Amino acid sequence: MTAMNDRNAIEDILDDCLARLKRGEDREKVLASYPEHREELEPLLRLAGELEHLPRVEPREKAVHRTLFQLGEETARMKLVSRPSYKARVWFARAAVLLLSFGLVGYGAVSLAEASLPGQFLYPLKLITEQVRLNLVRTPGGQAELRIALSEKRLQEVVSSAERGRVDQAVLDAMLREAAAALDNIEQIPPYQQEAIMGRLGSLSGRQQKVLESLKPKVPPQDRPLFDTAIQTCNQRWRWMHQRENMEPSRRPEPRQVIRQWRQMCP
Amino acid sequence: MNEHLDILVERARRHDPDALAELCERLYPELYRYIAYRVGGKEDAEDLTSELFLRMVRSIKNLKGSIRGWIYRIAENLVTDYYRRRAVRRGVIGEIESPDTMPSPQADPSRGLLAGDLQRGMRTLTAEQYQVVTLKFLEGYSTEEIAAFLGKSTGAVKALQFRALQGLRGFFTEDDRHE
């Protein structure tokens, strides 16, 4: 029992010494308060001092931003798969009743609609389902991500239709509109995510331009001017984002200016 | 400051993205340091810290008690898994029972970002001793604050602090004898 009390005593004494050193007291003076423990305390206090002077490792800013971005994506993903709010569920229920009233059988029809192309019977259902998904995502970052995904989807539809010799101006316009809409709430998104979204929009525009250019020879000659307009818009957007990325961060246009410029670049 | 942290944690538990981001920005540096001193490689430490915060987002709803105590436990599990994976990669399949079986930076000089006697000695501490040492001497928290973070009594923290410093002293005395 006495040995245990002694142990507790030395642990308390060490802590007291460390606290006094931290307050700026001289080590010799602190040790002089406990002459009977001096021999045991002295090397421990010296070690503690050395630990406090270990080189301080700081994380790289890039690594923190990467983690913050991953965090944003993970949160948006979790919100997408998590149980929607009561309001959203009411909205979803109404949409489901609407779909059923059209004589379509719930999920199966929605799944079939997912693969449908413009002009096909189930395509309007696909657009309604997308609208429901957009309403279920509550964070501005998540909505921007979904808009980018929808713009990609419209591009795929343009590709599938063009391979069948068809061009639908409404889908081409929707592809460009969804990409622009990704910036609608950009000011409400944390800065680290704003940059990432603008970067993705830049590369999306570049990809859309290349895909449309490669498809152009396959579409009927009378429809090519539609492609030309879309290609020009994508090219302008990609160039503008590319120039912005290459600017010094302090000289880059504010998100508000980006939104204005992108809207002007919409057909 | 802690009161504000509690409010932030409550908001983060509801997956408020701004609260999660702020929590990450506030805790990232100290947890990065904790992991970096433990694993010794900048890239590995960054990857593990990233993974740590992703785990935080996925399971913060289940958090009970102090955020720091909880997140430091996750960090420790990640570090243990990291060394286990490395051991498997090296063909040494087996459980890592204590940190002193972990490879030291000297065993792998290419990873020597934090090479140095003190860091080498710190790797011989138990997980709890290491937590107390980093929070106290590297992050500058008081014994009372550490006790609150880790959900321990101040007496337990003082005991861990004392044993950690004694352990380090023993490590260096041993080292000196070998040299």
Image (cartoon, coloured by chain):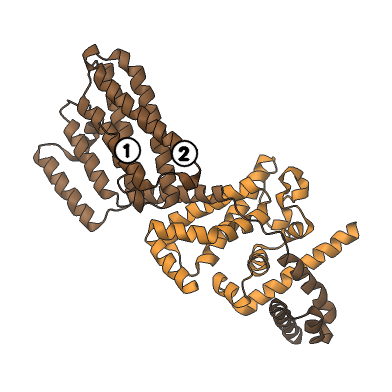
- Badge number at residue A245: 2
Please name whichever residue, A55 or A227, is drawn nearer the observer in this view of the structure.
A227
- Observer able to see residue B48: yes
Instruction: Quote the CA–CA distance across marks 1 and 2.
Output: 15 Å
The image position of residue A39, as x and y in percent, is 85, 78
Say whether disc 1 or disc 2 marks the residue closer to the N-terminus.
2
The chain identifier of the residue carrying mark 1 reads A
- Check the picture and name the quadrant holding the N terminus of chain A: bottom right
Q: Give the residue drawn at x 50%, y 69%.
A: B66
Q: Give the SS element for disc 2.
A: helix
Looking at the image, residue A225 sits to the left or right of residue B171; the answer is left
Task: Please say if A210 is above or below A99.
Answer: above
Please name whichever residue, A10 or A250, is drawn nearer the observer in this view of the structure.
A250
- Check the picture and name the quadrant holding the C terminus of chain A: top left
The image position of residue B137, as x and y in percent, is 68, 68
On the image, numbered disc 1 is attached to which residue?
Answer: A262
Q: Give the SS element for disc 1.
A: helix
| Chain letter for the orange part | B
The chain identifier of the residue carrying mark 2 reads A
Kind of residue at badge 1: Trp
Q: Quadrant of residue B136?
A: bottom right
- Observer able to see residue A161: no
The image position of residue A248, as x and y in percent, is 51, 43
- Does the CB distance between marks 1 and 2 fall below 8 Å? no
Kind of residue at badge 2: Glu
The image position of residue B81, as x and y in percent, is 60, 50
Looking at the image, residue A178 sits to the left or right of residue B74; the answer is left
| Chain letter for the brown part | A
Marks 1, 2 in one chain: yes
